[in-house]
Image (cartoon, rainbow, N blue to C red):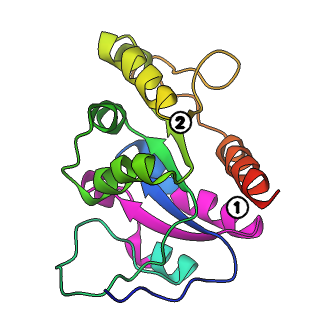
Amino acid sequence: MNVPDQPENPVLHVVVCATPRARVIGEFVELAAERGWTPCVVATPEAMKFVDSEALGELTGYPVRHKYKNPDEPDVLPPPDAIPVCPASFNTINKWAAGISDTLALGLITEAIGMGIPLVAAPAVNSAQAAHPAFERNIDELRGAGVKVLYGPGVWEPAAPRSGGAPFAWELALDALDEFRAASAG
């Protein structure tokens, strides 16, 4: 299998889910690059409706991936050193915790748990979704598997449905990723 050369800086596979916050994922990508990461974007199929894949490709230097490649095709993204799931949708959180791997994005993050790749999840849900009994249970499940889930009092809390939401501070996810990087270097 052909794998692209590993860049000088550590690589992020930024997994983007279908939430309104996905429209501005370029901001996160730019901030990650400023902090010394090489960001690549992997979108869920539904997130492709929200992102400008051409602009993100120009920004990162890598195509936005959203589906599995054919087995005989080379990988177009370098292997990740860490994976932020940012924004993480209600659907993705619940499927991920259940081990469902029916998209490229879910396949990468379910496998990353077993590979020991650092994972940070930044849920982007509303208060009605967060009230579903499966959501808290699945947040706990992911945390138990070693995923740093940036959710809860004092971190980030959901807003009411259709209220415009409480935007997630990209810096929180980047700070968590930087902590992983510092721990692996030291």
Query: First in sequence: mark 2 or mark 1?
Result: 1
Q: Is residue 71 left or right of residue 130?
A: left
Query: Residue 128: horizontal and vertical position, in percent?
Result: 36, 14
Q: Quarter of the image holding residue 150? A: top right
Q: Distance between the Cα atoms at labels 2 and 1? A: 24 Å
Circle 2 residues within 10 Å: few <14, some 14–19, many ≥20: some
Q: Residue at x 48, y 47 (%)?
A: 85
* Range covered by the magenta-colored residues: 25-54
Identify the amino acid type marked 2: Gly
Q: Is residue 24 magenta?
A: no
User: Which label was assigned to residue 31?
Assistant: 1
CB atoms of marks 2 and 1 within 8 Å: no
Return the residue nearer the eye: 159 or 100. Answer: 100
Identify which residue is drawn at 35% across, 89% down.
2
Q: Which residue is mark 2?
A: 146
**Residue 98 rendering spot, x and y as whole percentages:** 26, 31
* Picture coordinates of residue 158, whole percent (x, y): 51, 21
Disc ID at residue 41: none
